[in-house]
Each structure stands twice: as structure tokens, then as C-alpha cells.
Image (cartoon, rainbow, N blue to C red):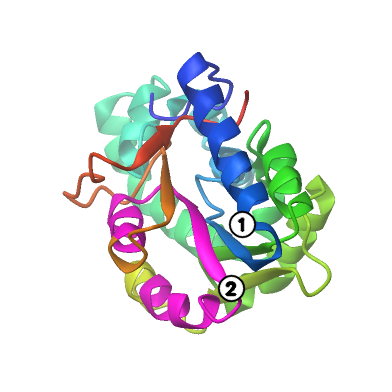
Amino acid sequence: MPYDPFHQSDEQSNVLADVLALAQKAGESGVTVFDLDGCLFDTRPRQVHIFRELASQEGHIELYEVETSHFQDWDLKRTMLNAGIGEERAEELYPAVREYWWNHFFTSEYVLYDNAMPGSCQVVADVAAAGGHVVYLTGRDETMRAGTEEALRRFGFPIDGDRARLVVKPDFDMDDTEFKAQALVDIARLGTPVLFFDNEPSNVNHFQDAFPDSTVVFVATDHSGKPVTPYEQILRIKGFLI
């Protein structure tokens, strides 16, 4: 499965140690940009909750079988099949699951069911301690700001003060990569962007193109499924445990 939040390896430890050293070297002038969904936050608990809530409301007992390990990508039918629900029943349930998921996943209330990726809070805290700016650049939109800020505080991510900020889309329908490309203009005014963390191949490639002297880290969890491959020079991790 794509998600492996408890992954540990010498290679990953070296990447995380190196990026922290870069943040320390940049000091107060440095800017580090973190994505949220599939990067700092594991969204699978949010999705499990949605499945089970629908199961409770509609009596679809099979949906209680869905666990975090069943999420291979964003295909909800595949998730049901991975949970052992038969092809015919999954096809029958899919319209209701899709509608309920769509109406709840992108809400300020339901982001509170996410878990922070193990080790991510410490990595962000260490980067913030280096003195630079921390920017959470997310495809979540303005309607999700309140819940997102609460979630960041709940897990201990730095968010209050002028050295850490949350940047969200002004409009839900705006393409995530397009939004992040535009947001970089304002982010660059804070200082020198030195580090980027994201789980979307098109985003990490754009970051590398826009700031060729920066270090970009691809977090290999899940992504939109667009046929894009991260550039070879981009660093890769599966999680934040050292």
C-alpha cells in the first residue's frame, strides 16, 4: 500500500537530517513549505470515519470492515474491494458512498479526524526552531481553515505567530497545482524558499522548477493519480520517522 507512515530507514533518516541542517543554515531568512493532506496529515482516519458513519446511518454493515490499510488510492470502490466487499455489492454501494464522502471529506469539521503523520510534528518543530518561516500550503479551501488551524494546534504544530502561517485556496474549484504556483509569489516575499515537502508529483516538480536552488522532498503516500513522475533529483521519503 502507498501509505507507510511508520517507515524507517537510514536513507530517510539521512534525508531528514540533511533538510534540518539546511533549515538551520538558512536561519531567519529561510522559508520551508509543507503540504498537509498525505504529507503532514494522514487522511485515512477521516475516510474510515466517513465510511462507518454512513454504515451507521444506512445500515450498510459491510462498510464497518473498512480500515486505514484498505486505502490504496482515492478510488473508493477499490477501497471497498480491499476491505473484502464483493464486486457486485461494492458497485451497488458506490453511489451512496461517493456522495456521502464528497459531502463530508472536504469540510472543516471532518479534518479533525485526521492523524498527524508519526514524527511530522517534531520535524516541523525542529525546522521552526531554526528561526525561519514555516508555511502550510494546502489544497484545502477557505471553508476548511478553522478546522485545519484547530488540527494543527491539537497536534502541536507551530501555527500561531508571524513565523508560521496557513495558506489555503480562496476557492474550492481552483486547481491545486495552479493555486500553489500562484501562492509561491507571496511566499517568496517572506524570505528565501529553501525546503518544500509535498506528496503530489506535479507540485514537487513545479517547486523545483520555480526554485531550482531549493531542496524539494516528495512524500510518497498517495496522490491524485495524474501521470506525472517526480524529477529524479527530488528527494523521497515515506514518512517523518528518523
The mark total stands at 2
Label 2, residues with CA under 10 Å away: few <14, some 14-19, many ≥20: some
**Camera-side residue of 70 and 135:** 135
Residue under the image location 25 percent in, 31 percent down: 88
The magenta-colored residue range is 179-208
Residue 100: image location, x then y, percent:
49, 56
Residue under the image location 31 percent in, 51 percent down: 224
Q: Name the residue carrying label 1.
A: 26
Q: Is residue 188 magenta?
A: yes
Q: Is residue 135 left or right of residue 229?
A: right
Q: Quadrant of the C terminus?
A: top right
Q: Residue furthest left?
A: 227
Residue 51: image location, x then y, percent:
54, 41
The quadrant in which residue 77 appears is top left
- Distance from disc 1 to disc 2, alpha carbons, whole Å, reads 10 Å
Q: Is residue 58 left or right of residue 213?
A: right
The quadrant in which residue 122 appears is top right
* Residue type for callout 2: Gly
Q: Quadrant of the N terminus?
A: top left
